[in-house]
Structure formats: structure tokens, C-alpha cells
Amino acid sequence: MSIEKDLIEHFSGLDIPKKLLSLLRFDNEVAQSTYFSEGFEFSIDRERFGLKTYSEHEAFLDSIYEFACADGSGSSYGFWLKDGNANLDVAPIVTFGSEGGFHVVANNFNELLQILTFDSEPMIDWDEVDYFKDPDDFEPSEKSKEYREWLKRVCGLEPISNANDIVKKAQQEHKTSFDAWVANFYEG
């Protein structure tokens, strides 16, 4: 089954953002198994093994829709259907760390698209999420230039120079409510 069909099935009737499908096509046609942003890779965990380490409660699992790896160790990006909102275009983007920790990283999918231009894996722990790259040791992902051009041309969005600015804004908007919501299901 193709990743596009997997995504459509995974989102079980929700309207998938057009930009997400367009990004998937970019990934398949241009990136072709090479990174366009460090650590980002489309991935569907049908069994939701990672999420189930936090809670197996149906209301929890029905409100988080993971769609991509955030790093090379199993951290993930997902949509949070906050307050039952099923509009994925405006749903906050959250990340769950492979070693623990969960955080809001973007107010919406457009902001995640911009974060990906920073071309760095998030460092996720229980206390924070941080995007960092050493300017003296940084090598861009193989298709990062093509991704930036695609983002401007297709999505009308500009690349960014600091992913943490977007994270900070998203956390100001959603951190308290996300943490409280997760606490209903997870007692870590």
C-alpha cells in the first residue's frame, strides 16, 4: 500500500490538508528517499505503539494523528485534534519523543512546514523541545534547497532561520491546555 493510501486510511475520514498531500508528492517525486529536512520522514504507526506508551484510552488515541518521524530515533509528529476540532489545517502540531516527552511545536501545519526549512531534528525530552544546529558543523540535507523552493512556490511560505521562535509562539498558545489534556490520560 502506498504511503498516500496509508495516510488517507489512517486519517479515517478526516480532511487531509492539501499541503500535506502536496508535501507527500514532493517527498516521493523530488526527495526520493533522501532527506529534505533532517530527521523528517513520513511514517504511519498503525498500531500506535509509541502513543500507547502514554495511554491506551480511546479519547487520547482518537485525538492524536501521527504522520511522520521527527528524528532518526522514533520521535513523531502528529496533529492534535484540540477540543474535538477535526480541521487538520488549523490543528496544532505536537511531537512525542522516543525517550519521553510531549510538546506542542507549531500552531498549525503551515508552521511545521516552515520549521522543516530549519533542517534540524528536534531534541525532545520531558522538559522541552529544542531545534538546534551547530553553524560550524552543519551540513544541509540533500534536498533542502529544493524543499525551500517548493515551499515558496507551492505553499507561498517563507523559510525561517529560527525554528524555536515558532515553537515558543505555539507553546504560548497551547502548552498549558495540551499538558492538562495529556494529564487526563497519562500519569508519568
Image (cartoon, grey):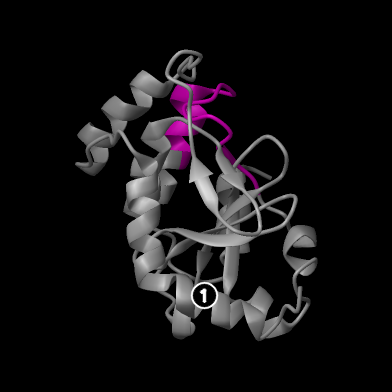
Asked if residue 122 lies in the magenta stretch, the reply is no
Q: Position of residue 46 (x, y in %)?
A: 74, 59
> How many discs mark residues in the rendered view?
1
What residue is drawn where x is 61% and y is 62%? 102
Q: Nearer the viewer, residue 147 or 104?
A: 104
Q: Position of residue 75 (x, y in %)?
A: 66, 48
Q: Secondary structure at mark 1?
A: helix
Q: Is residue 174 above or below residue 139?
A: below
Q: Nearer the viewer, residue 91 or 73?
A: 73
Residue 9 visible, this angle: no
Q: Nearer the viewer, residue 114 or 129?
A: 129
Residue with the mark numbered 1 = 178
Specify whether 149 is left or right of 134.
left
Q: Is residue 26 above or below residue 45?
A: above
Q: Is residue 23 above or below residue 86?
A: above
Asked if residue 31 lies in the magenta stretch, the reply is yes
Q: Nearer the viewer, residue 5 or 140?
A: 140
Residue 131 visible, this angle: yes
What residue is drawn where x is 48% and y is 22%? 134
Q: Which residues are magenta?
A: 24-43
Q: Position of residue 26 (x, y in %)?
A: 42, 32
Instruction: Point out the image quarter for the C terminus.
Output: bottom right
Q: Is residue 107 above or below residue 155?
A: below
Instruction: Point out the image quarter for the N terminus.
Output: top right
Specify whether 177 is left or right of 111.
right
Amino acid found under the numbered disc labelled 1:
Phe
